[in-house]
Amino acid sequence: MVSLAESIRGAFSGLAVSDAPPDRLSYARDLWPRHHIGVTAGRLAASEPGAIVWPRTSEEVAAVVAFCAREGIPVVPYGAGSGVCGGILPDARTVVVDLKRLARFRRFDPEQGLLDVEAGAMGIRLEEDLERRGHTVGHFPSSILCSTVGGWVAARGAGQTSGRYGKIEDMVASLECVDGRGELATLRRRTLGPDLTPLVVGSEGVLCVVTSVGLRLHRAPAHRAFAAYSFADVPRGAEAIRTLYQAGLRPAVCRLYDPFDSALARRGTHRASAAAGHAPGPAEVTPGRKRGLARMAPGAGAAVLRQILRRPGALNGLVDGLGARLLGGSTLVLVFEGERAPAEDERARAHALALGAGAKDLGEAPARHWLEHRYSVSYRQAPMFMAGTFADTMEVSAPWSSLLALYAAVRRALSPHVFVMAHMSHAYPDGCSIYFTFAGTGRDPADAEARYDRTWRAAMTAALGAGGTLSHHHGVGRSKAPMLGAELGHGVALIGALRRAWDPAGILNPGNLMPREDDPGAAVTQAPTVPPPRDPTLDAASQLVHASGATSLAVVERVLAAHDLTLGLDPAALARGDDTTVAAWLAAGAPGAADPWLDPVDHLVAGFSARLPSGAELALRPAPRRAVGPDLYALFHGTRERVGRVTGAYLRAHARGAAAAALPVGLDRNPSLDAAEGAFIERALAAARLA
């Protein structure tokens, strides 16, 4: 019988193909921590791909996908395998397409501020190359040493400097894609629409294979300004961040660590300083995660660690009982960057805000030390698993009005199962992300896996119940897929319709993002809908106004004006004056809205509801930059109601006079539409309309 690899070799001359056992094992899965529990018990991957291919051009990718579509062979796009949600899990019938040989710069245009780079480019090499040229993309995920540009797009990732440059979706100007039929097209971002790049960002390889990405370029920062503060507790630190971002400040790095994580940081820095032969100053703090627990793991400490983690409820209770005051409070790290004068000015303004909020100044040392060790913390899980324990992270987000309830609810849900700590990062004017780190153990690997699963179910249920998201930047994969409907509701059906339009044979990464129908976890609950209000309602803490689609923009502005807020629209750009409704305005692409390229940290619509021609209702609660599949709002922005009508929207309001400093940009805001892209868009809109 001819093997899968032999079939591909016969069909393609010169294409690198392998089915060697080491390669099949290496490409069997990603870095989902649940897998690591089995590895520590000596269990290798349960299934492996039938073949791995290494194309060198987009045309080769398209040819391979077309061949697999004809033969009914599943295809899994592969970057560097650093995902942590189970997005890679091929079987023996599957071809893994490793894209790392597509790593060239196709276009470097500093004048326009554009880099076109192939999807297989490794993150750290990309940024090092750009730095030598005096530029940056501004995307620095903790996984930058082992992740690719295509992986960033697929997972809808965030980098450590998102506070200035935004998430990956804010950086994408275009995407070259191969759909499930093997057809190649380039999707381009447009401020007025139609723009379907948000449907590919976060699609995790189930809609198409990304082969090249147009990314926005920035001048490399000429200067960095550092600051750090200690707050009495998490709520006061979070309130300071909210005030800072809503005042128009945009620190590239903004991270608030809870009291326990901050206390571990101080202890870790003291040890490091003592080993270096000097005593640390009182402000030498290095916030991070997994340091103290991981340090206990080797040798005899492993048994002690397992004993400690067998009673997580008591351990969490002890930490809570100590209180923020005894643990030393919460540490906020800030890094501003850009030209010297603006960066120093923003630091000075942030300093005044922090002290006004009751913070203690820690000086520059904690922030400088954080920058120096910014990546090392992501590679300290191995000792935990070697010790017979497990560790994982969960990143969620919510508007400011729900953030502290989210923090408390997830901590409460995790505490009986695992030891938990957290920090807040990736902040926006309307909300923030919370990054939970947790560790646990079991009597044996099977018990540890069961505890791991219970932990995640409890945490996800709590997050959604508190008004949060399932993911802010790690994506969904298989780990969160069973809960997808609880957040997206009818959005699950819309994603399914898009898959059928772009991948009719269903070969692209089956089982990821949305489970297969025969998967026991495929049953999903439906997200609750929130009827749009008759009159606009304001969430003042989050600066979000919830308006019915039938409400005129003039009415929205009058409601906001009573609170000294505004949508910040350009009246001259509104097509139909004061009578323009929210629904009509969004369907036209929101003319007159703030240019999203100028302040990538802000966004226009945080959540929305829509009615489809079928009568189905789509409702997405407000959240700052969820990474729970594609951004379905793209189906309605600037598409002239071809998919459906927006019935309500959560719009970003702005304090008068609090605009962020605009980032220079020379990109074309509304590029022309070619035939290939037009065909992609037509298929997507037609399919979504029928969902």
Image (spheres, grey):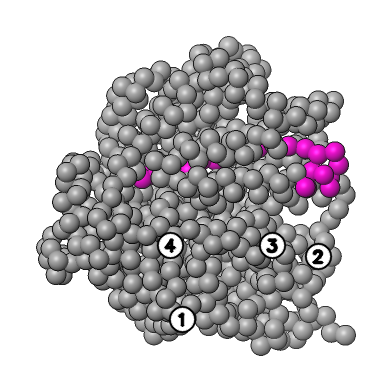
Dot 1 alpha-carbon crowd within 10 angstroms: few under 14, some 14 to 19, many 20 or more: some
Residue in front for this viewpoint, 529 or 328:
529
Q: Label 2, on which residue?
A: 47
Hey, which quadrant is residue 610 in on the image?
bottom left
Residue in front for this viewpoint, 491 or 479:
491
Residue 276 seen from this side: no
Instruction: State if disc 4 and disc 1 touch (CB < 8 Å).
Output: no
Instruction: State if disc 4 and disc 2 touch (CB < 8 Å).
Output: no
Q: Which mark is residue 521?
A: 3
Q: Which mark is residue 368?
A: none
- Left/right placement of residue 618 relative to residue 422 reads left
How many numbered marks are there? Answer: 4
Name the N-terminal-most of marks 1 and 4.
4
Question: Which residues are drawn in magenta?
Answer: 428-450
The residue type indicated by label 4 comes to Ala
Q: Provide the secondary structure element on which disc 4 rests.
A: strand
The residue type indicated by label 2 comes to Ser
Name the N-terminal-most of marks 2 and 4.
2
Asked whether residue 441 is drawn in magenta, I would say yes
Asked whether residue 186 is drawn in magenta, I would say no
Dot 2 alpha-carbon crowd within 10 angstroms: few under 14, some 14 to 19, many 20 or more: some
Q: Provide the secondary structure element on which disc 3 rests.
A: helix
Q: Label 4, on which residue?
A: 619
Q: Label 1, on which residue?
A: 690
